[in-house]
Amino acid sequence: MISTENVSFHYTAGSNVLQNVNLQIKDGEFVAIMGENGAGKTTLVKMFNGLLKPTVGSVLVDGVNTREKSVAQLSRDVGLIFQNPDHQLFAETVREEVAFSLRNFGFKEDIIQGRITNVLTTLDLDRYEKSSPFVLSGGERKRVALAAVLAWDPKHVVMDEPTIGQDYLQKDHLRNFIVQITSQGKTVVIVTHDVEFVAECKPRVVLLSHGKIIADGPAAEILTNPQTLQQASLVMPQIASLMKNLKDFNPPPNIIDAFSAKAFFSGKLKGRVAAGAPTQRR
Amino acid sequence: MDSPIHRLDPRSKFILTIGFFVSALMFTNIIALLVIFFAQVPGIVLAKSPRRWLRSLRGGLFLFIFIFVMNVIFGTPIVTALAFAIRFLAIMSAFSFFFMTTSADDLGLALEQIHVPYSISFTFTTAVRLVPTMAVDAQTVVDAQRSRGLELDKGNFMKRIRNYIPILIPLIISAIRRSVELAEALESRAFGASEKRTAIVTLKMRIADYLVIVATIIGLGLAVYVYLRVPLPNLVIPIQIPRLF
């Protein structure tokens, strides 16, 4: 479990980036931390692996205060994938890039080679293992950065803006991948502005605004509340917005994704057919 | 930040900086160099930047110690070695003071007005402007690699040097990428299309600027006089360190 207890933080005195944040993320949960630019999202997740220590309060990872462990020790359990993969890529080959963190953590060489092969195959990067990471496309470099973190199999995986620069297909792969690793019991935390992606994934949503948590709950509940979303400078997912405008059909208030919308309208159509009502305009 | 020093024309501030630089180069006497170093303090206080100035000095501490130690190792008397290190600090402080109190925009305007080709002045001011951006990038790279288990402060001296390879390579590549993108953006905005450029803002020298220039010339003249005519006392520390080389 990752928990924050009355956490406040400032970079410069007098300007709190986080204010009295209390948050608990249970093992195996999938959580999306959302909010406007400067809300404190990245600052918050950097506390999970000890890169930042709170000014006030405590952050506990699996019961251990992050002040008591080094970043390297905390990173063994909390894998943080940065927004821009170019900030970490440096090796001559993709294989060496993935091996870097495994060597830092002291894995034996035979285990390192095995883990690299597994993770590259999982992320469809095996054909690039001898390529330079710098010649890959943006999406491929992002997958290399993901592979580099997943190779050491951290218990908790934190992704900062994982969908930026990704086309729909890559986002779909990412969504399936998140489902896969959460089913393996890993905690997944994503920091994102992408309401459409969150609507499709339906995680627990934590909304931050000006350093405070203003909402915390299921995606269907949070992403259909216009006042709360406005406070966090977010807009409703398109499907939710469409449903709000189709009041005549009495849609349930918590439809935020296309699949649920399709199921609802299929039900409505079947109902109309059963009732003998016209289903097409003449 | 706003202060009487910040409001000075960059050209007058640069002349003042050169005055300190030349004075520092002239002397090897520790007392003279200490006077040159501390003579900058009133200007720094007037610029409301003592903390930033001290932080910049802290950045030069390693080189200060390195210069002192290397000189002592190669047989320079302790006081002279200390004087050389203070000279470095005085020069670094003078240029630090200039860049702390001069914005990149004003610097660019000043270079243009003294007829430095625009391509050169733009290159220079862009480099200065990108230093804080690169500093942020550097911190992000350090954070990213620490998150992958890199411990910069572990290991022997050679290991610690090698630990910086995963920091430097992403930083250099990021800088190169940024340069290419900037070049493309500039070309798309017709950079260099016309020889004659116009400017919304032009710098004008004021009375305060002329006073600074006059004071610099007088100070430099005094320094030359002292160098040529005034025998300065020599401090001696009676400690003999055996020459290693």
Image (cartoon, coloured by chain):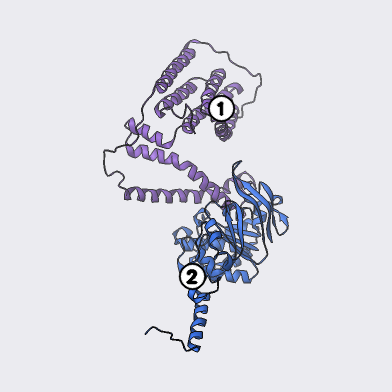
Chain colours: A blue, B purple
Give the structural element (helix, strand or loop) at label 1.
Answer: helix
Identify the residue position indicated by label 2 in the image. A239
The amino acid beneath tag 1 is Ala
- Report the number of discs: 2
Quick check: A31 above or below B80?
below
- Residue A28, percent from left and from top: 65, 67
The residue that appears at 67% across and 65% down in the rendered structure is A27
Which label number is shown at residue B85? 1
Which quarter of the picture shows residue A45? bottom right
The residue that appears at 44% across and 24% down in the rendered structure is B16
Give the structural element (helix, strand or loop) at label 2.
Answer: helix
Q: Quadrant of the N terminus of chain A?
A: bottom right
Between residues A55 and B63, which one lies in front from this camera angle?
A: A55
Q: Is residue B68 left or right of residue B189?
A: right
Label 2 neighbour load within 10 Å: few <14, some 14-19, many 20+:
some
Between residues A239 and A196, which one lies in front from this camera angle?
A: A239
Residue most toward the right?
Answer: A63
- Residue B191, percent from left and from top: 31, 45
The amino acid beneath tag 2 is Ile
C-alpha span from label 1 to label 2 = 68 Å
User: Does residue B115 show up?
Assistant: yes
Which quarter of the picture shows residue A205? bottom right
Label 1 neighbour load within 10 Å: few <14, some 14-19, many 20+:
many
The residue that appears at 53% across and 70% down in the rendered structure is A256
User: Does residue A53 show up?
Assistant: no
Q: Nearer the viewer, mark 1 or mark 2?
A: 2
Which quarter of the picture shows residue B126? top left
Q: Are marks 1 and 2 in contact (CB under 8 Å)?
A: no
- Residue B130, percent from left and from top: 45, 43
